[in-house]
Image: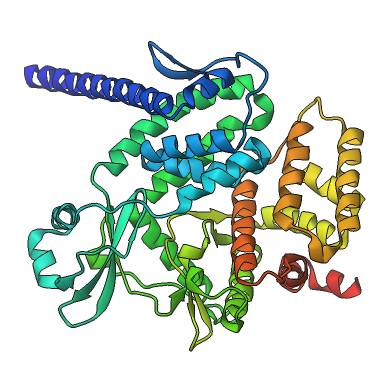
Amino acid sequence: MLKLVLASRDKGEVKLFQKTRNLVAATVRSQQIVFVFSRYAVWEGLLALGLELGKRGLSFSRPRRASIPLDAVFGKKLALALYRLGPTFVKLGQMLALRPDLIGDPVASELRVLFDQVPPVRFGVIKKILKEELGKKVVEEAFSRIETKPLGCASLAQVHQAELKDGTPVILKVQKKGAAKLVRVDLSLLEGISKSADLAFPRYGIRQMYEDFYHATIREVDYREEAKNIEQFRKNYYSIFSSADVIFPRYYAELSTQRVLTMEPLRGRKVSQLQKGSTVARQAASQSVAAVLEQIFDHGFFHADPHAGNLFFMEDEGKIGFIDLGLVGQLNPEDKRRFLKVLMAILKRDKPGLVKSIYELGEPSPKTDYQKFEADIYALMDEVKSTGVKNVKLDKVVNQLLGIARNHRILIPNRYVLMLRAFLIIEGVAKSLDPNLSMFQMAPPIVARSLMKTYNPFRIFRR
């Protein structure tokens, strides 16, 4: 009995110690965040928006004044501050960079610098992590060579080329020391901010945004999740109805852990290295767009971060390859049907259909005025019509639609926003390779094929 009492007391002491340690870590991190924001002269702007530092750490209150100038200067300073704060805030900045409907084009444009590579960590540190994760004996017996110069550096991880003992080339993705722990502390701080910010700005759906950001970020710090994603993508493309021109790297389960992922390298060149407007670039552009649209509308399981650095083009084989598969999105059949209605309404310039489909896609507030919402959508579609389909920038149209929905207190669930994010990223990549490519012209055949699978084929045939 005494042993049980002592064991129970020990467990209680451990929990109290962990709670105290977490509280200390959160307090210290809060001070670091305030220091960095102050150093880069963005703290005053955040104070104006309602961000505060109190006894309980960072919190959010009512804004001190109606607005602050969200211009390019503020965007540059914010990008620097987020970069200095590490992986969680870099990820947050990358998410905001793709939401100009929330923060404005000038700030969003400046935050795109956060997609670039970061300075490398010393190879000695990386090798130590490999030995800790795989075991010193496994590292010595499995690899004949590991390149000391990194192939790529990101906020969370560093990538190195290596070779197995049998001469097989591989890629090592190694998570930086302390990154996962720091991410968890930051997410706990952001959770508190999101709760109070959601009360201050209910129409933005900030709490839901945080939930989606939390789950996506937590999955990215566990490479076992990325391994599962690789398996799912490869399984989806085994189907005879899927494109044979899309490939994903295999991974080595016995040489992969939560913090290390060992994969086969993809041949070819990153699409970011292709010459703009060349025949190869145009082919890569069209195949990249087709692949992402197929993932969204056919599979309902898609790469949510298909930027130029994550795409390879194998010119000899005419294949497009995807890497960095930690961030994915999923849509169920009902989600796909709802969004297909929106896309088809845009493509057909069906104003009543677009109003109805967006209204059904989102979650309207009791204060939403349907007629005023309809009038704003009609005005946008008239603007699109006058511009001409070939001159329309899809990212601008989508961001304007999201802005109209938000202004009328129609909350668009973030699973759709994640999909739109992938949609807009791949459009940007394609435009950088082939300025003449039009998503409005590429999407209809892929969408039509998805409709054939989603709806009753006899009904489609009658139409």
Residue 253 shows in the view = yes
Q: Residue at x 31, y 51 (%)?
A: 119
Nearer the observer, 325 or 387: 387
The residue shown at (17%, 59%) is 134
In-front residue for pair 328/254:
328
In the drawing, does residue 185 fall left or right of residue 108?
A: left
Image: 36 above or below 168: above
Residue furthest front in the image: 73
Q: Quadrant of the C terminus?
A: bottom right
Residue 451, above or below 181: below
Give the image location of residue 102, x and y in percent: 65, 37
Q: How many marks?
A: 0
Position of residue 354 relative to residue 39, above or below, is below
Q: Is residue 87 left or right of residue 106?
A: left
The residue at 79%/59% (across/down) is 392
Which coloring applies here?
A: rainbow
Would you identify the image quadrant in which residue 184 lies? top left
Residue 3 position within the rendered picture, expressed as x and y whole percent measured from the top left? 7, 21
Q: Which image quarter is the N terminus in?
A: top left
Furthest-bottom residue in view? 316
Q: Is residue 400 left or right of residue 219?
A: right
Query: What's the residue at 58%, 71% (across, down)?
Result: 288
